Image (cartoon, helix red, strand yellow):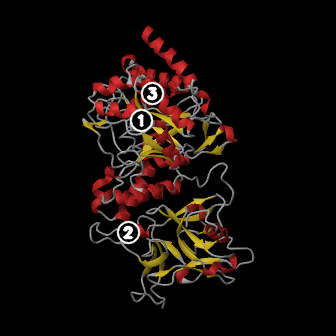
Amino acid sequence: MRRRVALCLVLLAFAGLHAAAVEAVTLSTSSRWIVDDEAGGRRVKLACVNWPSHLEPVVTEGLGMQPVDAISKKVASLGFNCVRLTYPIALATNASLSSLTVRRSLLAHGLAGTVAGVEANNPGLLDLTLIESFRVVVDSLGENGVMVILDNHVSRPGWCCADDDGNGFFGDRHFDPDAWVRGLGAMAALFAGVPNVVGMSLRNELRGPRQNADDWYRYMQMGAEAVHAANPAALVIMGGLGYDTDLSFLAARPVDVSFAAAERGKLVFELHWYSFADARAWESEDANEVCGRVARGVARRGGFLLDAAFPLFLSEFGADTRGGSRKDDRYLPCAAAVAAELDLDWALWALQGSYALRQGVAGADEVYGVLDWSWSKPRNVTALSRIQSLQRPLRGPGYDDARPYTVLFHPLTGRCVVRRAADDAAAAAATLELGRCEDTDAWAYTQPASTLAMRGAGRGSPPLCLRAEGSGRPARLATSDAGGCRGDALSTWRLVSGSTMHVAVNATTTTTPSRDGGGGLLCLDVGEDGRSVVTNPCRCLDDAAGGECDPETQWFKLVTSTRSPATGAAAAATVARGLIAA
């Protein structure tokens, strides 16, 4: 006890060195949205990346590769506003562990090379205790404007996860629920005054043969109340069963905690979604049908909570950034489409390009990593840009600048259909292409089949609609007559595949010339230049080849936004001045 009290006094003194570096951020919930109390209830979209500190050495990954401030600055520069920072509960419950120095912990695991790396990059951390070094990482992120969600990943330090690793469910050999509740309260109290710690995730990926809903309610509610009592300002984030893939049981029995129904609530739910949960289907079945089926499963297992007025945090998703994985190459555009359609808060797995020690391997590579093995630069700029398009909120409190309109989002590239025109008078002759989603116009569309009409093409300009011109030819904006484009087969668009992302017209009865002789369904597609928006015969609608057909270039998700849209003329003028990327 004396040793624990001494450690707490050290930490309190240590905390005072950094607490003034950033302004406080207090987040709450308003219906399905996370909002900023200090900004009048304006929505804050969590666009996070996971950064582990839960493996055997209990040292935040990357400290032997780069200075902590450089890593924090990299997180912010890549557009992430938040880090889901993992830790083992033993860091809060085992004083012998938390008071171990970084140097001693690394050497105890045979990581002399990592000690040398920390000495070179973060010399001031080597002789700090593990809990002190963890706090330095939190403060560094705060000093760079990055929020933190503390995630209890495991009880005993180590790689997660397996059914039989002893960390899976309450009562497993390394998972004492009473110690866990005490540990959550201790971590919540320790970080209660830290300005950028905005939430605590109670437990990562509950799993294994012992899992059951009754114990989930019993202990998760106890853990939630312990966190809230110690830090009432923090969001409390609850995951479900089955490796955080299943919250469906909440439809029949809501959570009973004291802080859920307040005007400004604190309860958030989290869900995980990876390709390997449906690996065989992604690899060998019709990608349209798999995407539609899996997306409906995500809605059934967790998405329904949005309609029940709770935020849903997709706290882990990600893919092999090297490319070439059929399951990941199909899954990630599907996941991005769902995240955009629901405008979810999310956390990508993962920041780290490598590990000091993972499952007995020193210097192990992380192929899901945003950063490369050396932590010095992005591993795959193209893959990263697809994710960055999801960082911007599309709607929610404070983002009601326009009545709801449609955005044509291309999830494979993370870009949107935009128009380039010199002025509004030339709007009908504009080129449509994939560009920044910030530059999109407002489209109007009514399911199941209607025109895609552009709102506000320009003062005094006639209404415009999207029209197909034939196979391999650019889609163009047509000037409507008094009746609009209704009745024109090549201006009437419908969603025709199981993914609901093939946007097609029926060209069967037209005489429109095309490279393949015309006729059949024409779908929006990306031109050979990788940028222009064209129409081509729809692919993979009936994948008789058994999953060999790849439809992703023809996937366009119709997403709702209420942000102020760009105008084609304004966007074009800005490009001309060189102020935004072409």
- Residue 565 coordinates in the image, percent (x, y): 64, 63
Q: From mark 1 to mark 2, how far is it between C-alphas?
A: 45 Å
- Residue 227 coordinates in the image, percent (x, y): 51, 26
Residue 366: mark in rendering = none
Mark 1 vs mark 2, foreground winner is 1
Residue at left offset 32%, top offset 65%: 286
Q: Identify whether 132 is placed above or below 245.
A: above
Give the residue number, with chain letter if any, for mark 3: 124
Of label 2 and label 3, which has the lower sequence position?
3
Q: Which class describes the residues within 10 Å of circle 1: few (<14), some (14-19), or many (20+)? A: some
Q: Which class describes the residues within 10 Å of circle 2: few (<14), some (14-19), or many (20+)? A: many
Q: From mark 1 to mark 3, how far is it between C-alphas?
A: 9 Å
Of label 1 and label 2, which has the lower sequence position?
1
Q: From mark 2 to mark 3, how far is it between C-alphas?
A: 52 Å
- Residue 147 as seen in the image, left or right of residue 545: right
Give the residue number, with chain letter if any, for mark 1: 121
Disc 2 marks which amino acid? Pro
Q: Identify whether 131 is placed above or below 39.
A: above
Give the residue number, with chain letter if any, for mark 2: 551
Helix, strand or loop at label 3? It is helix
- Residue 194 as seen in the image, left or right of residue 338: right
